[in-house]
Amino acid sequence: MRDVSPDEATHERLDDEELMARLQYRDLEAFRTLYGRYGNLVYSTSLRIVRDAQIAEDLVQEIFLRIWRKPGSYLPQRGRFATWLTSVTRNRAVDEIRSRNRRQRHETASPEEQQREFPAPERNDPALTAEMSDQRRLILAALTELPAEQRQVIELAYFGGLTQQEISQRLSQPLGTVKTRIRLGMQKLRSALAARGIVVQGKSRPGAVGGPVFLGRTERPLVAVLDRVNKISDNIAAENLLKILGAETAGPPGSAKTGLRAVAAYLGGAGIDSGSTILADGSGVSWYNAVTPGDITMVLTDQYRRQGTFGRFLASLPVAGMDGTLKNRHASTDVRGRISAKTGTITGVSTLSGYAFTYSGELLAFSMMFNHYPGDTDGLRAVQDSVMAEILRLRADPPADK
C-alpha cells in the first residue's frame, strides 16, 4: 500500500485501497466509509451460510473489528478489496458452522435430507427477502431450472459454504464428478440468466463488484422500516435509515456522516449534551459508540412528549412475551405485554431500553446497559428479566405537599 496522509481527499471519493491505507493512521472516518460500502455485503454473505441473523450480525462486528485492528492483512497486489473481503467473510462463516458442529447432525442424512439442509431462499424469508432486488429473484428462478444434481452442488457450494472436497464427501461422489457438475451447472445458469436479460461477463466465480451498481429500486413505508429496525433489530435497515435521515436533512445522496449530524442535532434539541456522546454508526454495532443510560432515558422521554408520533414509535418496539426480540422473554409471567423495549447485543454487551406499564397504571421509561462482560450474555438477559419484573412494581413519586 502507498502511504496516504489523513487529509488528502474526502473519504467518499477514495477507493477501497486508499481507505485501507488510511486505517494505518487509525482514521475512523475511513473505517466508517468502508463499513457503509460493505456492511451489507458481509452481513448477507454470512447470513446465506450460517442461516442465523444474530450470528451473521456478530460476524459483521468481528470481521470489521479485525479489519480495524489489522488493516495490513489486505494486500492489494493480490486482488480487489471486495473480493478479498467476501473470501474472508465466507471462510469465517464456514468456520463458525464447523465450530458449532452444525454439520455433524447431518453426516448420515440421505441426499434428499442434505438437499433440504441448505434450501434456496424463499420469498417469505424476511431476512433475505428484504435484500433481494428483482434481479436476485430472477437468479433464484434460473437456479431452479438446473438439473437437480447440478443445483444441489451449487447450493451446497454457494449457500452452504462447502468446499468441493467437502461436497464430494457429503454426497459420496467422486471429486471430479462434483467439479463437473458445478462447471456444467454454472454454464447452464449463465444461459438461463441471459434468457432473462441478465448478461454475465467473465468467468463464473464467487466475488463482488468493486463499486456501487444500480440493480433496481424498492420502496417501503417508513413505519414498516421502523418495525424492522426495532422489532427484529435489523442492523442493515438501521444503517440505511440513518442514511435516509441524512438525505432528508442535508439533501441526497444520503450518507452516514450527514445522518449522524442530524442525530446529533436532535440530541441537542432533546437537551442531551452531544459533546458527551460518541456516535459511530446507525445500528449500534460499533465499539466506538458511547452513550449513557441517562441519555437514552431522555430520548425515550422526549419521544413520549411527541404525542403525534409516540403511538407509532411505541408500537414499533418489541413487547415482552409477545413479539420481536422479546417474544421468548417473560412469555408466561405477569410481565408479558407490560414491557415495550429495544434490545441491543454485541460481544460482551447487552442492553435493554424502553417503557414499562406498571401495575399501578403508570408509564415509566428505563434503560439498562451491561458492558465489557466476558461471559455469555444469556446471564445478563436473566438479570434484565429480573429487573423488568421489579420495574412493574414501582410507583412514581407523589407530588410534595405544599
Image: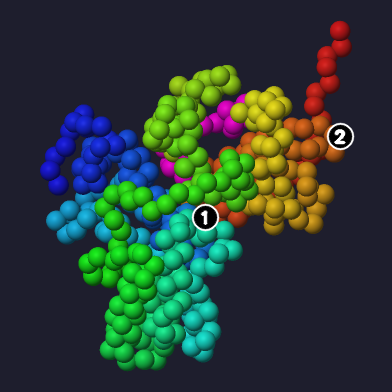
Q: CA distance from mark 2 to mark 1?
A: 41 Å
Label 2: state its secondary structure.
Answer: loop
- Above or below residue 126? Residue 186 is below
Q: Which residues are magenta?
A: 282-298
- Mark 1 is surrounded, within 10 Å at the Cα level, by few (under 14), some (14 to 19) or many (20 or more) other residues, namely some
Magenta segment: does it hold 293? yes
Q: For mark 1, what is the residue?
A: 130
Q: For mark 2, what is the residue?
A: 360
Q: In the figure, is residue 12 to the left or right of 223?
A: left
Q: In the figure, is residue 319 to the left or right of 29?
A: right
Task: Give the color scheme: rainbow, by chain, secondary structure or one colour.
Answer: rainbow
- Above or below residue 292? Residue 24 is below
**Rendered-image quadrant of the C terminus:** top right
Q: Nearer the viewer, mark 2 or mark 1?
A: 1
Quadrant of the rendered image containing residue 271? top right
Tag 2: amino acid: Ser
- Mark 2 is surrounded, within 10 Å at the Cα level, by few (under 14), some (14 to 19) or many (20 or more) other residues, namely few
Tag 1: amino acid: Ala
Residue in the image at 44% along x and 85% along y = 148
Residue in the image at 61% along x and 28% along y = 299
In x, y percent, where is residue 234?
54, 49
In x, y percent, where is residue 9?
21, 32
- Between 29 and 138, the one lying in front of the other is 138
Helix, strand or loop: magenta stretch: loop
